[in-house]
Amino acid sequence: MKVMVLVKANKDTEAGVLPSEKMLAEMGKFNEELVKAGMMLAAEGLQSSKKGKRVRFEGKNKTVIDGPFSETKELIAGFWIWKVKSMEEAVEWLKRAPFEGAEVEIRRFFEPEDFAPSDPSGKLREEEMRLRKTIEENNR
C-alpha cells in the first residue's frame, strides 16, 4: 500500500519561517529511519502559498488565482510518500515524527486494481501501467 502523508500549513510556514536547526536535525533523523526501513519513496517541503497559483475550472472558463491563499488550515506545507503494509503501520510511524502543534493527514493512493470494476477488460489498467513504467524510466 502506498500512502501520502500531508503536513498541514500554519501561520509560520505561510510566512516563510523555516524550521529551526534543531527541528531540521530531528526531522533528518526521522527521515533516515524511514529510508532505512525501506518505506520512504519521496519527501518534500513546499514553499508558502504566496508563491503559488490556483486554476479554477468552471465550464469552459479557466481562472488563474495568485497566492497567497487565505485558508491556512486547507493548505499543505510538505509531504512524504510512504510504502507501508497497512494504514496502521503508517499511523505508528507518523506518531514518531518530531512534530509539535501540527496536524498531519495520511491518505491512501489508489492502486490500479482499485479501478477493476470500472475497467472489466483491463485495457485502461494496462495503459496506466505502461505510463507508470515510462515515468519511472524518465526519472532514472
Image (tube, rainbow, N blue to C red):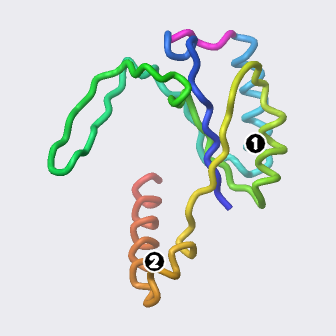
Task: Give the residue displayed 75% in from the left and 12% down from the top.
Answer: 22
Q: Is residue 99 magenta?
A: no
Q: Residue at x 55, y 9 (%)?
A: 17
| Kind of residue indicated by mark 1 | Leu
Q: Kindly indicate the quadrant of the structure image that contains residue 43.
A: top right
| 33 horizontally vs 46: left or right | right
**In the figure, is residue 4 to the left or right of 135?**
right
| Side (left or right) of 100 relative to 118 | right
Q: Residue at x 52, y 30 (%)?
A: 74
Residue range corresponding to the magenta coloring: 16-20
Q: Residue at x 72, y 27 (%)?
A: 28
Residue that extends furthest to the left in the rendered view of this protein: 60
Picture quadrant where residue 57 is located: top left
How busy is the neighbourhood of tag 2: few (under 14 within 10 Å), some, or many (20 plus)? some
Mark 1, residue position: 34
Q: Residue 123, relative to residue 86: is it above or below? A: below
Residue 18 falls within the magenta-colored stretch: yes
Percent across and percent down for residue 123 are: 40, 84
The reply, left or right, for residue 2 in relation to residue 124 is right
Q: Secondary structure at mark 2?
A: helix
Q: Tell me the quadrant of the picture where the N terminus can be found.
A: bottom right
Residue indicated by mark 2: 125
Q: Amino acid at mark 2?
A: Arg
Q: Is residue 68 depicted above or below 65 in this figure?
A: above
Q: Residue furthest bottom?
A: 121
The percent position of residue 132, horizontal first and vertical second, equals 45, 65
